[in-house]
Image (spheres, grey):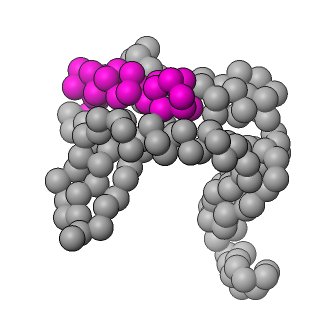
Amino acid sequence: MVAVKSQYTYDDSVAATSVYTLFDAEVVEELTHDHLVRLAAGVVGALQIKNFFTTAECTAIVDGVNAAEMGSYAFTPPIAKLGPAAYDFYKTGELGDAYFDNAERDAKARATLLDGEDPLGTAMDRLSAAWGNRVQRATSGGRPMYAGMIRRSTTAP
């Protein structure tokens, strides 16, 4: 049986194996544990948290990004990048030293973006408060993965 609930169509014949990820963005005033659980479960596709960073923090981060030395993808228009994406390095079934070298270098650059501080630390503190426990970066083979990728698109002249 096929049923329509709001704007989504659900097919009960595949309900046992389906995951109903809605991919809607939810706008919230304050991040809570429940928001993070629903995001992880795929019930909501994205969260937009109003004032997660203050206007002053956002301005400082943007100014820091604009001043930072960034790598780039060779696309047209070019895309500046800070922080390696694991999938760019995962060619042999594992992450090699090149990924972790890039991650370490770019983490040092990111660590100055918020008036000389790391905005990732601020974000993780706020996520930890909402989660009710300490959050930490993922690791691979005991080595810390990069978190907080930044991509900046430019328009072609």
Q: Is residue 116 visible?
A: yes
Nearest the viewer among 86 and 147 is 147
Q: Is residue 139 above or below residue 57?
A: above
Tell whether position 52 is magenta: no
Q: Which residues are magenta?
A: 93-120
Among the 4 quarters of the image, the one containing residue 155? bottom left
Among the 4 quarters of the image, the one containing residue 53? top right
* Mark count: 0
Nearest the viewer among 113 and 121 is 113
Could you tell me residue 4's position as x and y percent?
76, 85
Looking at the image, residue 119 sits to the left or right of residue 140; the answer is: right
Could you tell me residue 156's position as x and y percent?
23, 69
Q: Residue furthest top?
A: 142
Q: Is residue 32 above or below residue 155?
A: above
Among the 4 quarters of the image, the one containing residue 48? bottom right
Quadrant of the drawing holding the C terminus = bottom left
Nearest the viewer among 122 and 103 is 122
Q: Is residue 79 above or below residue 90?
A: below
Tell whether position 105 is magenta: yes
Q: Is residue 140 visible?
A: no
Could you tell me residue 132's position as x and y percent?
81, 27
The residue located at (35%, 36%) in the rendering is: 68
Could you tell me residue 115's position as x and y percent?
54, 28
Quadrant of the drawing holding the N terminus = bottom right
The residue located at (69%, 26%) in the rendering is: 125
Q: Is residue 33 above or below residue 77?
A: above
The residue located at (36%, 38%) in the rendering is: 67
The residue located at (46%, 26%) in the rendering is: 112
Looking at the image, residue 118 sits to the left or right of residue 53; the answer is: left
